[in-house]
Image (cartoon, rainbow, N blue to C red):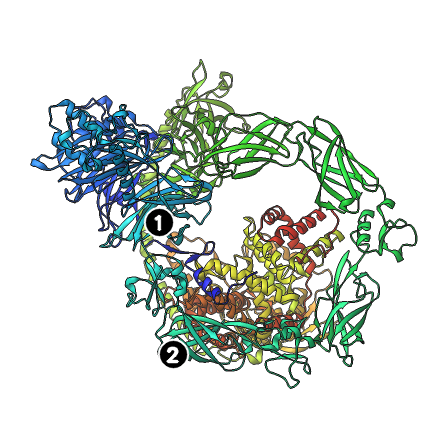
Amino acid sequence: MTLLPPLLLPLILIACGQLLTTTNCQPTRHVDDVFRIDDAIAAASSTADVTSFDCPVPKAEQSRFFRLDPVDTNATVILSMSNFLLEMDLTNEIKTVRGLRTGPQYNYTDCEQSSTCTAVSPSDTSNCKRENAQCVEDNSNLISTSHSLNLLVSCGSVRNCIFRKLSDIAEPYEANRTAAYACENSRILIENKQWVESGRKYEYMHEMYNRSGSHFLMIAIDGMGMRTYQVSNSDNNSKYEPIDDTNSYVQLNVKKYLNIFSHGDFVYTVFNDKSNSTKLFRICMSSFDDYKKYRDSSNDEELDILKSGMGSFNTVTIQCPLDDENLLKQASNIEFLDGNLILYYELVSVTHEIAVCKISIADINSAIRRARQDCSEENLTNIEFYGDDTGQRCRSSLSPEWVACGPQLTSIFHKFAFVAGFPFKNLDALHAKMQSKIRLPNIGERAVSFQTFIFKSTFYTFVGTTSGNAYKFVMKDATAKLAEKVIVSKLPILQIRSGLSNSEGEAEKIVALTEKELSTFKAESCESLYDDCHACLTSQDPFCGWCIYQARCTTVGSCEESQNPKRWIPTSHNSTRCPSFDVNPQYVVTNSFKDVNASFTGVELTLNGSFTMSVSLANFSKEFNITILRQNKITFQIPPLSSDLLESGTDHATASLILNLNGRPISKSSFTFFDCTRIRQTYRTKPCSSCLTQKWSCYWCARENSCLNQRCSGGKFSINQCPKTTKVLSSTSILSGEDEMFQINAKNLDPAQSYSCEIDSCTGRKYTAKGQVVATSPGNVLVTCNATADQLACKARESTVKILVVMGDKIVDQEHILSVTVYNCAIDSPLCGQCISLHHEFDACIWCNSTSSCSSRTLCPSSPVDGMGGCELPRITSISPTSAPTDGGTIITIEGTNIGSSYDDISKIMVDNSNCIKINNTYTIAKRIQCIMQNSDLEVTSQVNVWTTYNVQAKSIETFSFKAVKIVPFPLTEVINDSVIKVVGTNLDTGNSLELILESDDGKQEITTCNDRKSEAFNCTLPNMPKGMYMAKIKLDGYSFGLQNFTYEDKPEATAENDEIVAFQSGGGKGRFIVNATVALLKWMIIELHVEGAPKRKGCYVVQTPTRTTRKAVIECEIPPNPNKMEHDKSMKNQTLPSRRKRSTVGAYLIYNNDDGDKKYVGTVQYQSDPTFGIIDELPCANTENGTLYIPATKFGRTGLDATDYTVYFSPAGEGNEGKKVQCKVNFIDPETLSCRVRRTELNSLQNTKIKITAQTRYLTIETPSEVTYCPGPNLTWVYAVIPVLLIMIGCIFWVLYKLRLKSRNQRSERKMLMSKLDDLENATRETARNEYFQLQTGYMEDFTQNISHKINYRSPTKYFAQTFFNKTENIPVLSNNKIGDDELKQIESFENLLKNEEFLLFFITTLEEQKNFNVLQKGELASLLAVTFYEDLPYFTKVMLKLLADLIKAQASKNPKLLLRRSASVVEKMVSHWMSITMYDEYIYEQSGTPLFLLTKAIHYLVNLAPWDVTADKAMNSLNEMTLLGNKASYNTIDINASVQGSETGETTVKPKLIKVIDLDTITQAKEKIIDGLFSDLPYSEQPKPKDLELVLFRPESEPKVLNDIDTTSEANGVYVKINTIEHFKVLNNDTVLLRPYAINTEKNILNEENEPLMGRKKKLYHLISPKELAPEEVAEGRKHAEMIQKLIKTPLQEMFLTRMVKAKSTIHVYVNNVMKSILKPEKIPKGVCYFFGFLDGEAAKNKITDPEILHIWKTNSLLLRYWVNILKNPEFVFDIQKTTIVDSCLNVITQAFMDGCTVTNVKLSKDAPSNKLLYAKDVMEYKIWVKEFYSNVSSQDSVNKEEMDNFLLGLSKKFKVEFNRTAALQQMLGLLKKYSKEILAIMKVNENIYIRNEAYYNIENILKLGNGEVSFPSPQEISV
């Protein structure tokens, strides 16, 4: 394999960098400006060409039309589209100069030719019949301009050719400009208007040119010929009239016009004719001079002759030779450029290639002139002419003028004069020259538009594609050079044109058009695309060149002194012109200065003292001066390069030398630096010979047995003197499990030295055996080593054991690898045939009949078998398939036992009389063979017979059948991509795979396997193919059947049948759509409707099939309910006014054959509110004849739902009628009425009863808002209700007057009371504020060091890693032991071996991540399981993690790199977290941050306990978090109590009494916790007794001991609220004695007896400090409401009054917080893991060209500080065995948030409304930000940690911190993931590009899965290649 030169690799990486796509390495840029066309349309709608556009265009005839026409070189273009005309200015940014709406309008077909025939409304019928008016869209197919006339001609489907002023397109040119032709052509288009099969309307081509002061406009319309018009301003009489109609005398047989242009004295028309040839038609301009002079002639004969002759018109065929054998005949596009005709030919569509050919107009004119000259001299007799009398064409001898163009006026009356025009119909084809072949880089991308330009005589072409990309190709070589890619849009590019040109007519700005946008970009982008000289020059971009002394790719005008060839190199030059230099010497030893000479090549540089040289390698760079010897030659001294720069395991590296000028790299080279002392670690088995064969000078010193950089004292040492081993003389095939003596031949060994053998056993372990050395001949010795049976015990059939000879600790050279093969006869040889096969390789293995096993001869006491003749007879257990077509070709798989011992043992295989040819590479020893079945003349059934060479035959148990396969043909088929076709026939399920083969015209085939096979039919999903016709055939093994040709069509366009698609919000609806498709196309098409946001697509069915003429089908689709209904309902709530309520709209698309990528937009679904029944009091009786009812309704209908979609039920009201329903069959429905019919017998039971009416659709249920009386009788009850109501109303009036009087009296007394209460509130507030301020200034702020324990109780490494890996403290799977069966254990072992392969592990992780159902939680769990599995192999875990992370960085670099590592959305991000947890544990946690973090946690815990905290509300007086801050007044006292603990029920105390501080407001449980914490402070929390297990007993002199409980019979109760007992409740005093003791047996904890049960009932609520009235205030009388509110504020002030408590708490523990922050951000020693990982991030940023320091800051912050430290700060219990209460947790959250804010790079200005938690640490955060920056700076200044050093560190961690993980459980869970996603994984493996994944790993995974199902035996670890 050829390696890239070291210098070239970084250049390639640069060239394929951030601006390039990695797949094709093509320079890529985006457009400069984008303009939305809809914005211009909105502006243009106000400027109309006519007054009304109300005429409706039929849905089937609506279209989307776009055309772009440059006006001149001054950045102006005309954009014409359906019904609009826009003038755009592209000078700077794109903007609309003028806009005009032109349609749709009415057009008329019967108006007289003399009328102007303008677009008028239907009421204007002055010259036209109203009934003949047709509404058409105005598509301006033709735009032609004349600056001299200030004229713009716009031709389209309305008033076809309209004359406008070029200076203002909204102004008409002159009224009579639309006189003659416009009406006439309107009639032509209207009468013949139809859609052709390509889906386009008639296309126009045109050319406007000037001749003798008059302007002529030639127009060509596809299918209608050409016509020429004169536009004249003479005599102030503007005229526009036809002067020539080619259809009158020329039958061009035109299929499609390609272009019209004028050049010189001629007008040229290029077209494709119906014979698929490209032809050019030429007319002389002088012909129109003749017409001008004789147009008023009265001589009809003369005029007819003149018009028929019309000068000279000639046709010539143009072809382009693709190669020596192939001619390109039909061009797809034509351009005229710089006197040349540019022709584009689309080659075979599947190759995505376009041939570009060129022919000059001069060559075309010369060919026509030669033919005319020969004709005039009568030398041309076989030419074909237009007309009938061709015999008269070549007789007259003409003057040169006649030969050039046409007849002279003096001969106009000669009877043969017009014949002299030579109207040739066809000349010999002219051949254009093949310019270049364009090949699009991306498969699936198609060319849509082309535009060729010329710059400095170089042609280049922009190709617009279906994917919205514009590719720039330079036409220099046979294959066009792809210079760059411009990303324009996601929509196809319809046109590409020049937007702005320079004074020489060369394009400077390009404009591209899509259906929605107009975009511009520069014609070149040299500087932004190419970073080095080589990339710049090889681009061949004619604009670009390399500016040498600016070291950048520029245009000629952007480089100083670019005319000097020594300063600017154009791309026309070879890249060898780039400045470069070679260095001598090329090899430099490490750690020493070296003088080097450099010689320059390429362009000559002008060297001076401003130049410097720098050497760079990886993260190392150093600059130094040079000495100029002479021009193009310098010398310099390379500084010493440390050998530490070499990677581990290498002895040399390539460094770059860069010649700089003022900091800019001018030229580059490279050299190799080496260190011979590293030879031994680089070439482990050949240190001596490798030392002496390097390209550079290394010296072998025999005395030191080492390779050195300098000569040693022993003199010169040659390679022939190297000590080395040559071969193994003893047997190289040995038995497993037996002692063996190895004899090894060696040379140049010193017998006096001590040698040993290092045996690399088959288990992976290495053994050392002492060696004996005996000289055998001069220079040769024999080394003998003994290996024990244990060392050679192998569990594989064949194993290789390698041997090294070692002197001391240094390996002796190996001439060849020393190895022996160890055979284990019993492995993988359960069958006699397998054993005999092994016997052929290793004679010692034989089959032992007595034990029925394969073993060595020594272990077989009797009946040894060494040939197949002694084995059991072969048996065939299965055959697959069991049938095949009689045509043969089926591959049969035969399985069984003892089917030979080798492939050659099988002599023949037969079924009946048909032979089956065996296949060599499919043979599995003794078990399996495959063969290809030959044909059979008959349909027979027989057994499969296998014959062997040792005269033994085997017959299958199953039978095999030959079946005749037949397929029923079907007619010509039209299809689209992904269509599913159904083929019927007989015996179609026989044989193996059934394939559909599609073959294109060029012979290329696409093969698809058909599934879902049954005997009588099968289905085939067609592949994606380009549009066209393909031969199709079915192949079933040897059977082949040709189907009719398949014609691939584009996905049909579709539109909604009605203007609006309406559906109900909740009920959905139905919609009908018109699809432009044939019956044949619809047959194989699945159509579904997709509504944006809906989770599922809805099926559609055909309701009206297309006819042959219309090609339009009508389909009906179900419309789902509004997927955005929730958002719609919210918005509707905010719209209270009915006039402002709008229906929500959602886009609708048709999807063909499940192809979401190419869905067809059909409109928007207008979702209207759901239908309702109005308020119905009574429902009249049904029609007595047919039982019909009419139910009033609202908003029914309009949604496509009809009567069959509704079900109506009547449900009787009242008890006992539940479930009873009467169905009313709907027979008619409109928006306001629902009519249904019920059987009269069922209606009779409902008369005069209350009923509920329910209407249901699939998604919607509508009910009447209230019960309805059906068919009521007479009702007079209202009369009896009137009198009582009147009496009640009078009484109410008197009562209201009384209450108003009473209320006025009470208000006066309440006002006095409120003023008094307000005074009390003011005094209470003032007192609270002063008290809190006093506490802030005088409270705490003391050192807690003496009061908290300093004994740090770390969790075990197992607990720490498990909790950080799985982020929880309980139910961790890898800490439990599960019983696993033997089979599953074997599966796990095999799977583990696979995971040890890096390629498989990377594939496994990435494949799982790609699964849709593999969520974030599962990704995190997988990362945790991997960390557990590879904890003992952390270097491997690190390698995999960094590879995945590098891929993630590469993917994020071009998107939003700042999001990297912010979340844990991928496996690798979680792996980084675990890696940090492991690597930070020793150097960070244990050595530096552990102690301050422990003290901080304890200090917070102690601080919280110093003051009251409410256990039910989780609020404390001392808290850093406002959410857990106790916001009320609480007076408390501290009490010292003597506490001890009783160890058992016997009464002895096990802990000495100690004075413990409690608070009188503490609950009993809180007091217990403080006592336990004080007595057992040095014990881990997990080992301390728990309060729930102990009771608290109070002892006082002369009193009985009293048990204190949180709840007992003395507890305060207030309704449903019960207050928890406190120390104050039991009147505990200072120095009281308390004892903690275990609960007595059968005593319920904390509940004394049954008397307490009422206090603990379900409806009881406990509270502690906060009064229940504060939680749920009681309802008070209205009069006392304000007074009660004031009283509440007095008792419970506002929460904000107590925020100073947070400041006090923060000040108290500030020193502890700062110590933690300093230990993290200002560590005494930077951990190796941090240096290594940050170095990796720096390297990846450089690789991906990320230079923004903010991004690197974010990466490092996300990976270490936020990903690791935030988790540890919030969860110290992961590290320490301590208690973390809710209050402590909330305080840690505030500190952690401050730490996170300090890590961010942005400064957020806080306001008074900011959260109090953030304001608390606002100033500290600013200091932390400085510390973070200093931390990163300190890390950067550290020495880099290389991979070898980091690997050793990681291995040391694994050994230092042993863990007790259940690795098997972790592997079992990952195996479960493999099984869960096995189908997806195997499918992806099968097509993976990696050979190992596709073959070996696939086979092993398949076997592992089969083993779980009991299908196969267990594959050994050796079978699983790692």
Amino acid type, label 2: Arg
Residue lying at the far bottom of the rendered structure: 713
Say which residue label 2 marks: 630
Say if residue 839 shows up in the picture: yes
Say if residue 1527 shows up in the picture: no
Judge the density around disc 1: few (<14), some (14-19), many (≥20) Cα neighbours within 10 Å: many
Please tell me whether mark 2 or mark 1 is closer to you in this view: 2
Label for residue 1220?
A: none
- Kindly indicate the quadrant of the structure image that contains residue 101: top left
Left or right: residue 213 compared with residue 522: left
CA–CA distance in space, label 2 to label 1: 47 Å
SS at mark 1 in the image = strand
- Kindly indicate the quadrant of the structure image that contains residue 779: bottom right
Residue 740 lies, in percent from the top left, at 83, 66
Residue 1728 lies, in percent from the top left, at 56, 74
Amino acid type, label 1: Phe
* Of the image marks 2 and 1, the number of the one nearer the N terminus: 1
Front-most of residues 1001 and 1737: 1001
Residue lying at the far left of the rendered structure: 235
Front-most of residues 848 and 60: 848
Q: Quadrant of the C terminus?
A: bottom right
In the displayed structure, 727 sits above or below 1098; it is: below
Judge the density around disc 2: few (<14), some (14-19), many (≥20) Cα neighbours within 10 Å: few
Say which residue label 1 marks: 462
Residue 369 lies, in percent from the top left, at 26, 38
